[in-house]
Image (cartoon, grey):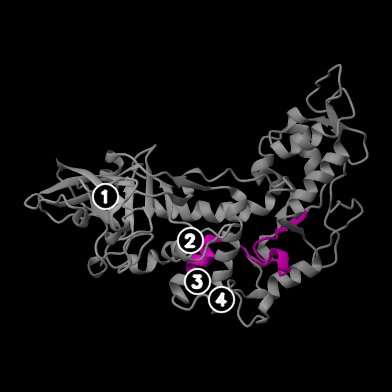
Amino acid sequence: MVFDPSEQIRDTGGKLLGQTPSVRGKGKYVCANCFKDYAIREFINSHLKRRNCAYCGRRAPQRISASFDEVLDFIVEGIRSEWVTRTPEVDWEAENFGWHGGRNSATLSDFLIRQLPEMRTVKGELLSDISRSIPRDWRPRMKYDPEPEDFFSYRWDEFADAVKYHTRYVYYRVHIDWQKDVKNRETSSRFRTRPSHVIEEALDAISDLNITCTIAPGTTIWRARIHDASNSFSAAKELGPPPFQQAVVSSRMSPAGIPMFYGSFDAQTAIEETLKAEREDGTSRVATVGKWTTLQEFTVLDLARIPAMPSLFDASRRGLRSTVSFLESFAEELTLPVLERGHEHIEYVPTQVFTEYIRHVYKDRKGKGLEGILYKSAVRRRGINCVLFITNVDCCDNVRSTQLKKPKHGSMMLLESSQRRPRASKEKSR
């Protein structure tokens, strides 16, 4: 889409919204050094025409700058991928059909340019020229636009609200109206969706993000259990995930009754993460940490290395921006403090639902699913945690007849050893 400089915008009273004089057509040229956004820099470097820059004053023996008009068209095309120009029709629909923020969501061009992360380093005359050369008023497209290609907002807070307070066990069939602040609005399906659609659209883009990895056989994973000092634990069935009947505590990714293997890639992170999940009970507590070895390869979603948000101006990858944002919100939820008992049955639902989709629904382009998730520790700066979709029966003890290449009874995790570490604690094992 190319910006039309003749476009004029009126407010709802029919009055032209004043636009300061544009610099379009003034023959200015700008170099890549005036921007830090990689996509804008790449565009300029592929459209070089002059040896000087009108904004930073740089000169060179070779071509270093592109036409301001062409760069402006490129910038506006990117903005239009997530923002729509304000018109009387847009204002009317925003108020009557419950678009996000209603009439008050309009944003002026100078504020819009300054708030875009890709444009925050643009300063002075260049910033001013861009602001006054684009339409004055905009609204956020992705939050409300009824067009099919923009329908799914991917907003984590909307998805979380739906499965926490509106539908939990049949969310994959129920339509939810995200915009609840406007009453008596049209109930057309273009303003309604299923919470499961949001997840499915996000999962579809995981392969494009290349954020899956494998945990090789023979990898060491640590898992801790905090317990009363009078007890002693050393067996796989004691230090692994609890049996189904004893999995009565909800975690961020697993509801009560569905145990999973939580662990960390170093012993101290495992202990501190487990302590974080514990509640004060006044008893003398110690930590027993088990050293586990993987007996098979695990393909996992690696949320410890979510890629940087693609630029708004990167036409080839900006379609992934919503998925990156969704996964960032999911990963952030996993690091939040453990809730007071009783609240977890509501607050943990969104992350539990998404984890279940990753476990049972996701398939890559080769039809392969995922067997776990990696995520950053909230208690240790460089600590990495994992949750593997295995249970107590998949874990075995280190006995002489067990061979890494031929796991006994199809076991997936081997308990190599355990250490008891005296420690006063507040917490309870995951």
Query: In this figure, which residue is indicated by the disc labeled 4?
Result: 176
Distance of label 3 from label 1 (alpha carbons): 30 Å
**Is residue 282 toward the left or the right of residue 332 in the image?**
left
Local SS, label 3: helix
Camera-side residue: 144 or 202? 202
Magenta stretch holds residue 150: yes
- Say whether disc 3 or disc 1 marks the residue closer to the N-terminus: 3
Q: Residue at x 58, y 60 (%)?
A: 202
Report helix, strand or loop for mark 4. loop
Whole-angstrom CA distance, mark 2 to mark 3, is: 19 Å
Q: Amino acid at mark 4?
A: Ile
- Tag shown at residue 358: 2
Q: Residue at x 66, y 74 (%)?
A: 191
Q: Residue at point 70% right, 49% down? A: 112
Horizontally, is 329 left or right of 396 in the view?
right
Query: Mark 1 — residue?
Result: 274
